[in-house]
Image (cartoon, helix red, strand yellow):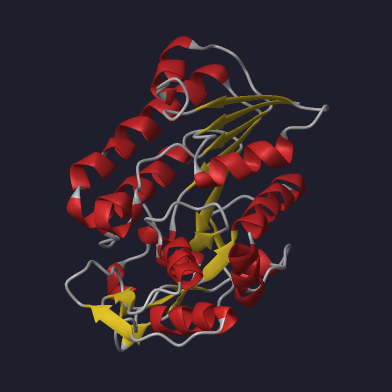
Amino acid sequence: MKILITGHKGFVGSHFYSRLNTPDNEIYGVDLKENDMDCRRIFSSSNVTFDLVIHCAAIVGGRENIEGNPLSVATNFSIDSEFFQWCLKTKPKKVVYFSSSAVYPIAYQLEGNSWNLREDMADHHSPKKPDKTYGYSKLIGEYLSSFVDNVYVFRPFSGYGEDQDLVYPFPAYIDRAKRKADPFEVWGSGEQTRDFIHIDDIVEAVLTAIDLDIKGPINLGWGRSTSFLDLADMVCKEVGYKPNIVTRPDKPVGCKYRVSNNSKLLSFYTPKITLEEGIRRALNG
């Protein structure tokens, strides 16, 4: 099978590259981190048809970048537009588009007004305000995907893993716990919650959906609410120390409550790696 992965040096893309890089597959990757190769150069020059394209290339950079550098994140509009134009031209057999839980209206994720988010609660045909330019770009990306055949759309919630960049909360907390940082810094009040899912479960869920031809959008999450204070407590207990927790209300925190309704996911795949196991793996890695 001939496979292209955009953003194959990033966190999500690298795991797909490792999982699919077998003798049976002819796999290609394109990433700014490798030879400064912008995937848009491929879209403008290549006419190769692939059996599978996994589109992970995007500008994110953590919460601070999403809130503090919105025009940088807006580059995703250009990346996705050129990507889907290229798909129309080359007609890949199957396309994976990574959207985001950021597409959901922030009105559903406020204190006292929060739900586990179902796929039908975000709709590009009648959009309500999503989460910053990143959420808008992914919602528009989903809309563009509707004009291309055989696209599988996924909305990961808080994906994490041992090799994730420190700009994201999970690896930052693991790093503090390994160093036994005291005080232990938690952004915001720490009461904001997320739905953490291990990168291995993300990869296997996506490949299972493709095999079963289950198109999206599909939430990728456990449906489990974990606050950042809870996460700090979990990683510190696993290491065996009890630091002073210092909250940072001056730092960007995002939505108050973001948790998946994962009924659609559970109809074909059950996540295997609990957050507790994921913490142990990361601390021992």
In this image, 218 relative to 45: left or right?
Answer: right
> Looking at the picture, how far across and down is residue 160, in whole percent?
53, 60
Q: Is 137 drawn above or below residue 67 in the view shown? A: above
* 52 to 253, vertically: above or below: above
Q: Which of 239 and 272 is in front in this view?
A: 239
Could you tell me if residue 264 is visible in this image?
no
Q: Nearest the camera: 198 or 127?
A: 198
Indicate the position of residue 259 as horizontal and vertical percent values.
47, 74
In the foreground, 216 or 27: 27
Q: Which residue lies furthest to the right in this view?
A: 24
What residue appears at the point 44 percent right and 24 percent down from the top-left corner?
39
The image quarter containing residue 284 is bottom right
Q: Which of 48 and 65 is in front in this view?
A: 65
Residue 147 seen anywhere in this rendered image of the structure: yes
Q: Is residue 95 above or below residue 184?
A: above
* Image quadrant where one finds the C terminus: bottom right
Quarter of the image where the N terminus is located: top right
Check the image and report above or below for 120 versus 20: below
For the point 50% across and 68% down, which residue is it? Answer: 178
In the image, taking residue 121 as reference, residue 130 lies left or right, namely: left
Report x, y in % for residue 180: 45, 74
Give the residue drawn at x 32%, y 66%.
105
Q: Position of residue 71 (x, y in %)?
A: 19, 42
Residue 49: quadrant of the picture: top right
Q: Residue at x 37, y 31 (%)?
A: 79
* 218 sits to left or right of 133: right
